[in-house]
Amino acid sequence: MAAVSGWGKLGRSTNIAPRGPSAYSIPNFLRGDCAVSDGEVFPVFETWAQKAHLDAAGYEAAAARAKTDPDGFWREVAGRLDWITPPTQIKDVSFNKSDFRIRWFADGVLNVSVNCLDRHIAARGDQTAIIWESDDPEIHTTLTYRELLAEVCRMANVLKAKGVRKGDRVTIYLPMIPAAAVAMLACARIGAVHSVVFGGFSPDALAGRIQDCDSKVVITADEGLRGGKTVPLKRNVDEALKTCPGVTDVVVVRRTRGEVPMTEGRDAFYSELKTTVADTCEPEPMNAEDPLFILYTSGSTGKPKGVLHTTGGYLTWAAYTHELVFDYRPGEIFWCTADIGWVTGHSYVVYGPLANAATSLMFEGVPNYPTNSRFWDVIDKHQVEIFYTAPTAIRALMREGDEPVTRTSRKSLRLLGSVGEPINPEAWLWYYRVVGEARCPIVDTWWQTETGGVLMSPLPGATHMKPGSCTKPLPGVQPQLVDAEGKVLDGAVSGNLVITDSWPGQMRTVYGDHERFIATYFTTYPGKYFTGDGARRDEDGDYWITGRVDDVINVSGHRIGTAEVESALVANPNVAEAAVVGYPHPVKGQGIYCYVTLNADVTPTDILEAELKGWVRREIGPFAAPDVVQFAPGLPKTRSGKIMRRILRKIAEDDLSNLGDTSTLADPSVVDDLVKNRTQQS
Ligand code: PRX
């Protein structure tokens, strides 16, 4: 039986029950089992302090102004966009339940695609907007701003011809090809709301996301190509649509030209559709608070949340942070390796860079194909100046030694970035010394799908760097640490990370479930946005993210709800019960550890273990495949039946000396059995 309507069974309540700071489990390898202490500081490079958009004094002044004159400050930040009607109302926010609202630039009118394309045409029409580097190192293409605009207009006209109107949702399930950016911008041009679903998601997960936002149109490709292997995207769509009767049209972009079944009257190839439409399309004037996109992300419950971002605030934040954090200048070659299926791809492959007239490199492949030098070869080939990737990729490449890096030049590089998970000091130092040859600053950017863009990061001309610390908030961002009861913690301390006031890029709601939005983010600590992360602040006021304090795990920078994996497991006919926790993994950051209780008549075998791993792969997607499955005759439960995850985490982490009080368990002997049979992690 497949999980219920694509989402899995809903397990837990929506409220996040944060663990107290004492319960943080910082994996040893993140604690710094290398020759770097917390205190090691890399000062701002003098050359950067002189030329950057913001130096230290500029940063202090901007942060102060954001507090004393918020409307003036944010009006100026929004002034970087072209508005059809510039906003007169700037910030209108309350995080309190009684009058809850988040509105930015509410009477402003603009169009996102105009800001990313049309306004650059006069001065930069012939500049490359997108460099596309294919999975095959022999193949790349480029699109100028003029070409990209024409292509976006064609796609927009195709969507219009399919009946898509302002406010309609369109699901995009594409690989990393230019058509993905084109499809997103085409939606923005006509006021449709896109929902990009990562190409690694299963048909079931795709179906759930299509149903939740009720898309009538899906844009996909025949097949994807990654690391020389094809991904059956169109076939996955066909499978998903068996449970999505509302979808009337599937637009299929040809990528591999592989044979795919086409359903008469529903499916059509984009290459044919686009010959029937014009290459100009009037942009739809949008209110700043009109929705721009939905992006599903995992939370503490089984059902992913449709994070909704709006037009004016999101684009302001994506563009502002892209310029500030990467010290970006128009025309520079910027490469963010993230897939457009995740928020990093939205904000720093497409919207931020294009709003800032960048040349954005889009990479279809993987870091180790055809060789472990691929990233660095691509940097040399296209003379990339700014490179932004995830710690998991850095750790995987670090394992292969220095030679695959040092045999390349990388002279074009001037800045490096990291995102998605805590970076361990050892990986940071390797990135800094070997990849960047100690001449490129590293920006360790902390943010979330919900935040739209970076909230904390060093600024290259203003902030010192510490390996493993995202250092300081950007101007206008107000972090705070609180304990489990909500008491504000001052000074050098660990706690739960909240943000006390809004910023323009903040999500506005969970699509279709505003109550859940408020319950998830604003009730744990009333009046404050709760990030779900734990953090430590050191004596210099620098922040160190220690990881999630809720039931979300971060596997290779991919956010996965443990409840989602549990839902997938219990949907297997052999499984009676499952509990899933994260454990430290040397490359992925965290791995997925599953405790599974089988039905009484089922015998645990190696074959069944492999079958369950494959089952989760198919139910959610390959990136969610369990690393460890331990068969457990019983799970540690309190007398009221609540699973004690703390104990399961400790066993998975192999921290057996520290299991804590087990006397409240209904059957304490369960723990002995779990410890005895603890599975050796791969
Ligand atoms: O736990 C934090 C971690 O990733 C989570 C957000 O995941 P997602 O919404 O998928 O967005 C990822 C890309 C922005 C956060 O709650 N995280 C993200 N960046 C960092 C990080 N943890 C530590 N350091 C970072 N730089």
Image (spheres, helix red, strand yellow):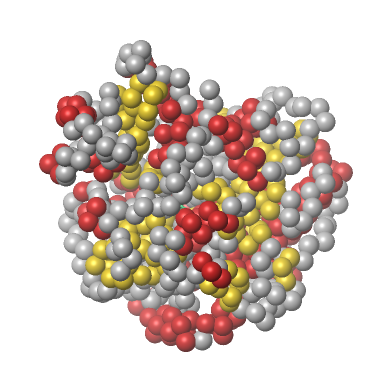
Q: How many marks?
A: 0
Quadrant location, the C terminus: top left
Q: Where is residue 568 in the image (x, y as percent from the top left)?
A: 46, 31
Q: Which of 166 and 84 is in front in this view?
A: 166
Q: Is residue 506 visible?
A: yes
In the displayed structure, 64 sits above or below 583; it is below
Q: Residue at x 83, y 57 (%)?
A: 280
User: Left or right: where does residue 297 sit relative to residue 261?
Assistant: left
Q: Which residue is drawn at 22% across and 37% down?
A: 665
Q: Which of 392 and 481 is in front in this view?
A: 481
In the displayed structure, 475 sits above or below 147; it is below
In the displayed structure, 675 sits above or below 415; it is above
User: Left or right: where does residue 326 sit relative to residue 100?
Assistant: left
Q: Residue at x 66, y 58 (%)?
A: 292
In the displayed structure, 193 sits above or below 303; it is below
* Residue 431 falls in image quadrant: bottom left
Q: Nearer the viewer, residue 312 or 530?
A: 530
User: Left or right: where does residue 107 sit relative to residue 277?
Assistant: left
Q: Position of residue 371 (x, y in %)?
A: 42, 37
Q: Which residue lies furthest to the left in this view?
A: 657
Q: Residue at x 53, y 53 (%)?
A: 516
Q: Where is residue 680 in the image (x, y as percent from the top left)?
A: 23, 29
Q: Can residue 408 be seen in this view?
A: no
Q: Position of residue 517 (x, y in %)?
A: 53, 56
Quadrant of ligand 1 in image:
bottom left
